[in-house]
Image (spheres, rainbow, N blue to C red):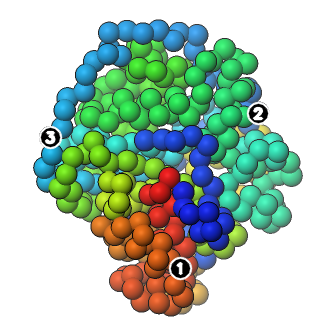
Amino acid sequence: MKKRQFIAPALAVALGISVTACSGSGDSAAPTTEAQTTAAETTTAAATAEETTTAAETTTAAETEAKEEVSEGTMDLRIGQVEGAAHGDKCFTVATAVIDGNDTVVAAFIDEYQFLDDQQTGVPNSDAFTADGSVAEGKVLASKRVNNAYYSENMKKAGSTVEIAANFDEIQKFAAGKTIGELEELAGKPAQEVIDAVSGATLADTAGYLAVIADAAKAAKENQAVSFDGNPEDLTLNMVEAAAHGTKCFTLAAALTDGTNVVLSYIDEFQFLDSEQIGVPNSASFTEGESVLDGKVLGSKRVNNEYYSQLMQKAGSTVEISANFDAVCEFANGKTVAELKELAGKPAEEVIDAVSGATLADTAGYLGAIAAAAER
């Protein structure tokens, strides 16, 4: 792949997995996202929540429109993931999309990450990010899904009656069955028209989320396909955060499953790098808001593949980080969740030997993270 997936309790503890509050549908980087940064002040979730909601929670004929039924059969599926700035400058969005051979979205997953006060649940290794001088004292980078109750309470104060995770779920549900072109066309329409079209979603930036899903779907077109023989309605796409590799970064693992098997998977890792590297969208505002300290940016290892892989090369690695991630995912695809969990529990060298093309010492951790996403 060129571009851009719950674990059993014991495995979750071992990996440092952070599981979302709501049900939904070493260190380096690679090419996938279009990181666009804007300068603005990072504030609390309450301020963001006011921008997030809209008073209009109306029901229209579009909401009852039946989706075209997809018949069972063999199809080629691809997965992609991007970061975007779907909602202002206080957070960044991560969207994952699976498409078929007709550029139609089969499944999508979105989450958003914002700096909150340290009483909330941060991504794995948040304490280490503060200790090493990357994140300001009193702040944690946090998933809105993981902090659904907290974030939704702030939205409620601003007039919203729909939780943030439920909003994300409705947008994902709407995107499934749409072509990339259809999503892009709707995302370009006036905000209220888009909100009216997406049943159950009340977010003012619904169009922005659809646009990022479309970008993830376009990224998927560049990645390797797998063959799926079955009913796409049986498929579920989920994502988790994990500490698959030490304390200097956190992993995002996505998995598309049919209930037993991992059909497709995707992993990326995020680490604080020097500010000369490519940061996630809105990195400038995170610094200006004093959540991220001067001289640092949070960067995707896939987006910064060349830079990170050079660091790995100095340590003796001959395989780029993105190629390692791809090899792990290609191995996981087609395996049962039970098989992945069993292998992830074996000695590190045995796991590396089993995964052709992967040389990462923490290969077992990445397989465990994919299994966690598949079980969520």
Q: Residue furthest right?
A: 137
Res. 204 image quadrant: top right
Can you give x and y, in whole percent of width and height, for residue 81 in the image?
42, 51
Q: Choose the circle earlier in sequence order: 2 or 1.
A: 2
Query: In this rendering, does residue 106 appear at all?
Result: yes
Which labelled disc corresponds to residue 44?
2
User: Mark 1: few, some, or many residues within 10 Å (few <14, many ≥20)?
Assistant: some
Q: Which residue is drawn at 32% across and 48% down?
A: 235
Distance from label 3 to label 1 (Cα)? 38 Å
Q: Which residue is drawn at 69% across and 20% down?
A: 156
| Number of numbered labels in the structure image | 3
Which is nearer the N-term, disc 3 or disc 1? 3
- In the rendered structure, the answer to whether residue 60 lies left or right of residue 348 reads left
Relative height, residue 187 to residue 27 (above, below): above
Please give left or right for residue 141 compared with residue 112 in the image: right
State the residue position of label 1: 345
